[in-house]
Image: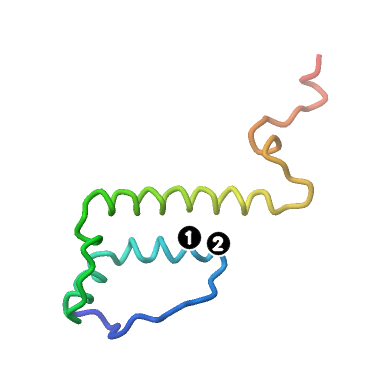
Amino acid sequence: MDSSYKDLPLHSAVRWLSCGKALERFVGCFDAIKAFLAEKGQDYPELEDEKWVVKLMFLTDITGHLNKLNLKLQGAGQTVLDMTLPPLSATSAT
């Protein structure tokens, strides 16, 4: 394996927004991680199961969308309606 990483770091207390980023990074390095684990003699059959991988990709996408929604809602007084309804101006009320 030609990767510059020789070991996997262990993160234990990760906030859920960071979990979404960790999932994205895991999926981005999926092939390299599989090769790394195979090189170390570790067997994880889930990584070869197509249904499991599809569920992982789906979870990653959904988590990414939830992270974006959460970040948009973090402003003072923000609601979901503020994000979905177009702003009403005084001239359009006629």
Q: Which residue is mark 1?
A: 20
42, above or below 16, in the image:
below
67, above or below 88, in the image:
below
**The disc labelled 2 sits on which kind of residue?**
Leu
Residue 16 is situated, as x and y percent measured from the top left of the image, at 55, 62
In the displayed structure image, the side of residue 43 where residue 29 appears, left or right = right
Residue 56 is situated, as x and y percent measured from the top left of the image, at 35, 54
Residue pictured at 21% horizontal, 63% vertical: 45
72, above or below 48, in the image:
above
Q: Secondary structure at mark 2?
A: helix
In the displayed structure image, the side of residue 27 where residue 20 appears, left or right = right
Residue 12 is situated, as x and y percent measured from the top left of the image, at 49, 76
Q: Which mark is residue 4?
A: none
- Within 10 Å of disc 2 (Cα), the crowding (few <14, some 14-19, many 20+) is some
Examine the image and state in which quarter residue 88 appears: top right
Residue pictured at 65% horizontal, 38% vertical: 83
Q: Which residue is mark 2?
A: 17
In the displayed structure image, the side of residue 94 where residue 43 appears, left or right = left
